[in-house]
Image (cartoon, rainbow, N blue to C red):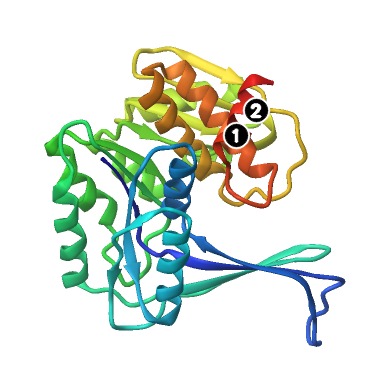
Amino acid sequence: MICTVTFNPSLDYIVRVDDMRLGAINRTTYEQVLPGGKGVNVSIVLGNLGHASRALGFVAGFTGDELSRLCAEAGVDCDFIRVPRGMTRVNVKIKSAEETELNGMGPQMGEKDVEVLLSKLDALGEGDTLVISGSVPACLPHDMYERVMGRVAPRGAYVVVDAERDLLTRALPLRPFLVKPNNHELGDIFGVELRTRDEVVPYARRLQEMGAANVLVSMAGEGGVLVTETGEVFESPAARGTVVNSVGAGDSSVAGFIAGLIETGSYEAAFRMALAAGSASAFSDHLATRAEVEALLAG
């Protein structure tokens, strides 16, 4: 079983506006509503690649209803926890001469809601995979990652963490199977700027020294690097293509890595599929499909 956890999922309302002006009425020329949240994206791409997963998280209000409907429409097995306070956030992404984002707050969750989530994770056991990704809303305890990992790790589940700064570093002592920072996030942790794949490797190894088994670093147009628990280093430039939308590309890489490892048992093959899935999402206005990933792998 594969489960993903998104503490604060969203509806992503994506619009294009010609020559947007502040303080004036602006009319859209394009609009789209998509299910959002890092773990939700991972579940969608896993499904596109032929691997079932269960998406966990918190939802509320009519926007929560719509998120659940869109996820089901995308083939995702949703087991969201409905809470009575607030509403699932709407993240507005405005594409004009410059891109502007306006992210909502999300619902209010309490300790009882957290306990419901933790109890659902008890279904995970030896050989299962849990993906925890994204931010933790202010209404939840700051140690949510540690609490979730502490619940599943003793049961033998593999834990994948995709988070920034303190959320990631505090999770490392619990020995996640895979962490996936991008090069900017990795550099932020250590106070350095990382531009090349060679520069990334020693800092990926430092994350291993802090507890991570495998470190996958996505680098947008520079490609990516994988440092494995066996000491191998794989690196590759990015596939050639036109970037249409980078939202969800990193999440697609996580899904590609999991799918590739399940299918082949090879870290190198998993790395190649991770890069292809990330690029396939970046090169289209939707999340990566199996056909798009295979085309990039073959090319």
Residue 90 image offset from top left, x and y in percent = 52, 73
Q: CA distance from mark 1 to mark 2?
A: 6 Å
Find residue 231 and report its image quarter.
Answer: top left
Residue 262, relative to residue 231: is it above or below? below
The answer to whether one can see residue 66 in this image is: yes
Which one is nearer the viewer's eye here, 161 or 76? 76
Q: Residue at x 68, y 52 (%)?
A: 285
Q: Is residue 140 left or right of residue 257?
A: left
Indicate the amino acid at tag 1.
Ala
Q: Which SS class for mark 1?
A: helix
Residue 146 image offset from top left, x and y in percent = 24, 49
Q: Residue at x 15, y 48 (%)?
A: 123
Residue 78 image offset from top left, x and y in percent = 33, 59
**In this figure, which residue is indicated by the disc labeled 2?**
295
Q: Is residue 27 left or right of residue 260?
A: right
**In this figure, which residue is indicated by the disc labeled 1?**
291
Verify CB contact (< 8 Å) between mark 1 and mark 2.
Answer: yes
Residue 285, relative to residue 289: is it above or below? below
Indicate the amino acid at tag 2.
Ala
Q: Residue at x 51, y 68 (%)?
A: 11
Which one is nearer the viewer's eye here, 265 or 23? 265
Q: Which SS class for mark 2?
A: helix
Q: Is residue 150 left or right of residue 240?
A: left
**Labels in figure, total:** 2
Q: Quadrant of the N terminus?
A: top left
Which one is nearer the viewer's eye here, 246 or 110? 246
Q: Quadrant of the C terminus?
A: top right
Find residue 182 and report its image quarter.
Answer: top right
Residue 221, relative to residue 74: is it above or below? above
The answer to whether one can see residue 193 in this image is: no
Residue 192 image offset from top left, x and y in percent = 57, 36
